[in-house]
Image (cartoon, rainbow, N blue to C red):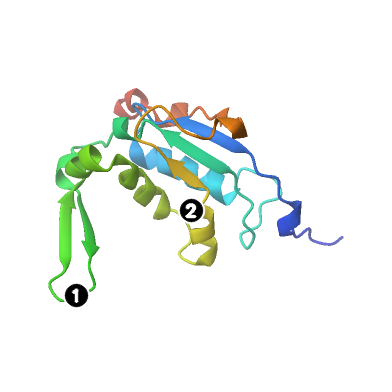
Amino acid sequence: MRTFSPKPQDVTRNWWVVDADGLVLGRLAAEVASRLRGKHKPTFAPHVDMGDHVVVVNADKVVLTAGKAAQKMVYRHSGYPGGLKAERVSDQLVTRPEEVVRRAVRGMLPKNRLGRQQLGKLKVYAGPDHPHQAQQPAPLVLPQARRDRAAS
């Protein structure tokens, strides 16, 4: 018996659309990262990009629990001395909500070329509209990521 190793040409990619309205950011990001990696497929292999394309809409309506929106800081550095910039997540949710979701998913992917390739299959939009209707994305329902479930 030989171990099956998938080849890149054996991969079939599906398109999923997730409505992030009222979903907890971390739970949403964990499920989206799993779909991007392809861990939901029976032929998953960690060294091959087996994942699907994921479109996240309504990123501006994502929820952070325990007051993290006001307390959590997002850091970036320009590369120059003294170039550290800090911004609250609550401010970033107002100005660039797509970046909040993208960073959360990015932190749950591998930190190598494969992770960067998988992150390329993530499309995040602040509003309810997206330009990927031609790909006929199937809705991905995440009841475990709902806010009301997290409160109980």
Left/right of residue 86 with respect to residue 115 in the rendered view: left
Residue drawn at x 33%, y 23% is 148
Residue drawn at x 49%, y 37% is 55
Q: Amino acid at mark 2?
A: Leu
Helix, strand, or loop for circle 1?
loop
Residue that numbered label 1 is attached to: 80
First along the sequence among labels 2 and 1: 1
- Picture coordinates of residue 133, whole percent (x, y): 55, 30
Given residues 68 and 36, the one toward you in this image is 36
Q: Is residue 34 above or below residue 137?
A: below
Residue that numbered label 2 is attached to: 119
- Picture coordinates of residue 142, whole percent (x, y): 47, 29
Q: Is residue 18 visible?
A: yes
Q: Amino acid at mark 1?
A: Tyr
Q: Tag 2: Cα neighbours inside 10 Å, few (<14), some, or many (≥20)?
A: many
Q: Is residue 68 visible?
A: no
Measured in 3D between alpha carbons, the distance from the residue under mark 2 to the one under mark 1, in whole angstroms, is: 27 Å
Q: Is residue 103 above or below residue 147?
A: below
- Picture coordinates of residue 43, whole percent (x, y): 71, 50
Q: Report the label total.
A: 2
Given residues 79 and 39, the one toward you in this image is 79
- Picture coordinates of residue 13, whole percent (x, y): 65, 44
Residue drawn at x 36%, y 27% is 21
Classify residue 128 by image quadrant: top left
Residue drawn at x 27%, y 37% is 64
Left/right of residue 15 with respect to residue 43 in the rendered view: left
